[in-house]
Amino acid sequence: KDASADATIAVQDQRLTVTLSEAQVKANGGKEVVVTFKAKIRPGANLSAYKVDGKTEIPNTAEYVINNNPETKKKSNEVPVTPPSPENPPIVKDVNGADRADLATREESFTYHITSAVPTDATAFEISDTLVDVLEFDGEKGGATVTIDGKDASADATIAVQDQRLTVTLSEAQVKANGGKEVVVSFTAKIRPGANLSAYKVDGKTEIPNTAEYVINNNPETKKKSNEVPVTPPSPENPPIVKDVNGKESDTLANRYDVFTYHISTSVPNDATAFTITDTLVPVLEFSGDIAVEIDGKLISTNTTIDNQTLTVDLTEEQVRNNGGKPVVVTFNAKIRSGANLSAYIVDGKTAVPNTAEYVINNNPETKKKSNEVPVYPPTPEGGEPEIDKKINKTLDYLEIARGKSYNYDITTTIPEDIVDYKEFVITDQVDSALQINGDVVVDIDGYSAEGIVDVVVDGQAVTVAVKDFSKLEGRSAIHIFIPATIRPEADLSTYVDNSVPNTANLHFTNGPGVTKDKSTVPVIVTPPTPPTPVPPTPGDPTKTVNTADGNEQAFHLDLLQRTSDFRYDIAYTIEADSQYTAFTMEDTLESVLNIQRVAIKVGSGENLVLKEFAELEAKLAEAKGTLETLEAKKTEITNTVSSVATMATELEAQKVRIAEIEQELAIKEAELAAASTASTVAPSTTEETDGTSVVDESTDNSQPVVDKQAEIQALTVAIEQLKASKDQVQQTVVELEQQIEVANTSEASLAALEVEIRNATASIEELEKQLAEKTPKATIAREVEAALLAVNEKGELTDASAAILGQVSIDKATNHVVFDITNPDVLASLRGRQVTMSIYATINPEADLSNYVTDKGIELVPNTASVTFDRNPQTKKKTNTVTVTPPPLPEPPGPPTPLPPLPPVEPPVPSDPPTQPTPPTPPTTPPAESTPPTPGKTLPKTGVAENGMYALVGMILGTLTLVFRRRKQ
């Protein structure tokens, strides 16, 4: 019970005192006393002193004193309160108030802000920031300041800078007094003058990162890093790259093989660590002499390499870092390669050999920059290229031809006028693997034998014709190659588009100037003719398909891979579910060119309708027996009811007599009550209430003598009420007996109808039992059929023993006639609704003559049709669709090659006038600008005479004029 009102409750500082009154103590000795009060953690309280093993526990105990005697003081148990551990505060950093800063200039200073919160329940808090090496603090300690809750707290905090690290340490008092309040450290930094920022490039963009971190209570496990805020200075522009030849944007060579000088001018990029300059000469040029590299006008030693046609100049990292922005010039000599074919460089009748240079910074392909193009213009050479063409049977690009039939590939290659100067001239044809070279490869030159002029090699499917004596081809027109071929009979063309087999020929040559080139013909196509489309089966008729022996193609046509390949015919028919057949025959007569290997039977999944009907009869019989049992019970009930009518009638009369007796007794008691009431008229009158009690009427005159009949009246009243209740009860019994007698009379009338129902139910049971007796043997056979259908091989085919349970398989190999005959109607009934399949495994007789099965397109088609017959009635026969099988044809033997006449000699033309000797050109009096002095000629072996390029040039001009004159005459 609440006793607060009589007790004294006081609070002083942190102490609650509850003092019971003397009366309370004396009156409640031994009784339980409970003091209840609420408390909470003081807002902003620092709980660090209450941490035990990393967990905060705030303790509390109570105590009592009896009779103000300190010696009676007793303490309670200690109950700790554990608040949720405060989360470590976030730490966020920005630069110039944003998450990144793009500087306007490299020298611009910027301000970092580190924002966090003083941790709750802590005693120490340190924030630090270490600048990367390319940054420095701007001013003393970067002008660092500290604010707590928006107020300057720098004076009480310790701010220190050592090398690149700024440390701000709050005092213990600051930490304890400001838990949860925002703390902001601000300082200024800038990019260190002369710093190379190459290490801070990300995807081509310079980003100098910075993060801050804090530690709570000097515990390294509490260390937390801020976000990273990058600073991006303006990117230095990549330097230009300019190229010249002989100090010009282009230059025209006086002679084809003059040496010329290229200059590549650019600058060392800023903030880079690597710089590579490359110059790739086109194939008709070659390097001549040494390479010079200058930085800021001074020759330097650097890594310079020539790999094939490419000159590469790699500056060292030190050279790049120390020379940012300084000019660099690469100088080298080049010339047109001896014997080079310049026809690819002829534009509008003028030969222009181009060249460009490029550089890459920091090995980053995205920094690649190309120079301008500087062309040199040598004299333009003359000449043409050979062409190659391929046909089928001389004129065709496409041929439909049966497998194994021979045809020719015809390859024609034109012979260029300057064939005698060629180094290589090779024609190849890689015949497709679906084809077969069917005879000797024949080569002619303008219709004459090429023997001794070319080498012909046939290696498997590869045909190679290589010219070995170019001199004998001078003045000739074309090389012709004839390759006899067939489509392989066994080739699988399913991976080829439309079964079409393409083929090309190729020409590889190296001409006199040394130009190597490859040319290919347009593909020519051969394809076997498509067999006629089979007519699909008519719905409802049996279906026939043809498959590989172990396949399930279910096709209407099959191309065999080998003439001796096994294949399988499947004749399938689904027996109608409502059929009443007594016999079923499936038969097939194979063509005489086929051999029967074996026959198998398959039956598809489905419900056995015989067993289903048997089960339905059993269910009907059980239901009929249940109905009869119900009718019999109902009959017994009605019979018992009818037999009790006489008893109920007697009881009814007795109850009616009882009612008469009760009414007589009631009349007597009511008369007695009336007499008693009359005798008590002088007494206070009473009124009988509805609940049977009497109420005295005080208005009655009470001056007359009183006659007391109240007890008698009361007894009579009770007796009357009891008699009335008995009468009501007997009357209810009378009503019930009358109803029962009426029901019994009605049931007696329906008993005859019930007898009829019982006789009908009995007759139905007898009929069902008769039907079951008749169908039991059929059901037994049906179960045997189901058991037989479980005995199958891995292909789902019935074993021979199981197939024999269903019917008889007959094979007459003399006539190639196969029959599957089901003569047991009960077996056939069990297969209603299921697909029956007869599989005939066959092969083509290897010695058979298939000439009678060749179509007008030359395809061998072996047909087959099967049939099914019901009840042995020929009029019920249904034929399947026709399926066909095509074996690979036998290859045609190659024909003998046609001999060719020998190649006649070519008469050289006689010039009408002798050629005029050319005048040697006058050497230039002054060397071209910036050209390198010519290197002294090599000393010729054995003579000791120095080589002179001028005589070589004159000799070449004379030879060229002679050749031009000869060709003009031809």
Image: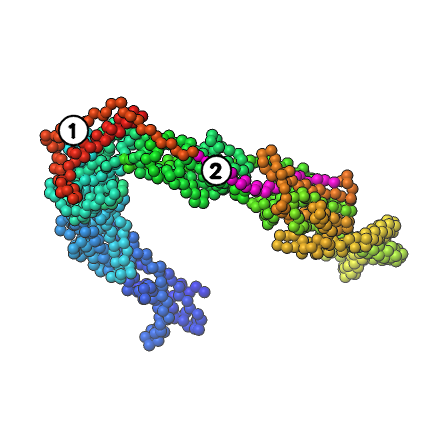
Q: Position of residue 214 (x, y in %)?
A: 25, 56
Asked which quadrant contains residue 507, the reply is top left
* Residue at numbered disc 2: 897
The residue depicted at 76 percent of the width and 56 percent of the height is: 780
* Left-right relation of 168 to 296: right
Q: Seen in the image, is 873 located left or right of residue 439?
A: right
Q: Position of residue 641 (x, y in %)?
A: 85, 55
Judging depth in this view, the residue of 805 and 540 nearest the camera is: 805
Is 315 on the left or on the right of 868, as rendered?
Answer: left
In front of the other: 302 or 885: 885
Q: Hey, which quadrant is residue 106 in on the image?
A: top left
Q: Nearer the viewer, mark 2 or mark 1?
A: 2
Residue 297 coordinates in the image, percent (x, y): 11, 41
Height in image: 776 above or below 878?
below
> What amino acid type is highlighted by mark number 1?
Pro
In the picture, the disc for residue 908 is: none
Sequence-wise, the earlier of marks 2 and 1 is 2
Residue farthest to the top, as pictured: 912
Q: Which residue is mark 1?
A: 920
In the rendered image, the quadrant that contains the C terminus is top left
Magenta region: which residues?
877-900
Q: Which residue, as the protein is rendered here, is positioned at the far left? A: 925
In the rendered structure, does residue 883 fall within the stretch colored magenta?
Answer: yes
Q: Residue at x 20, y 51 (%)?
A: 132
* Render colour scheme: rainbow
Query: 371 or 497: nearer the eye?
Result: 497
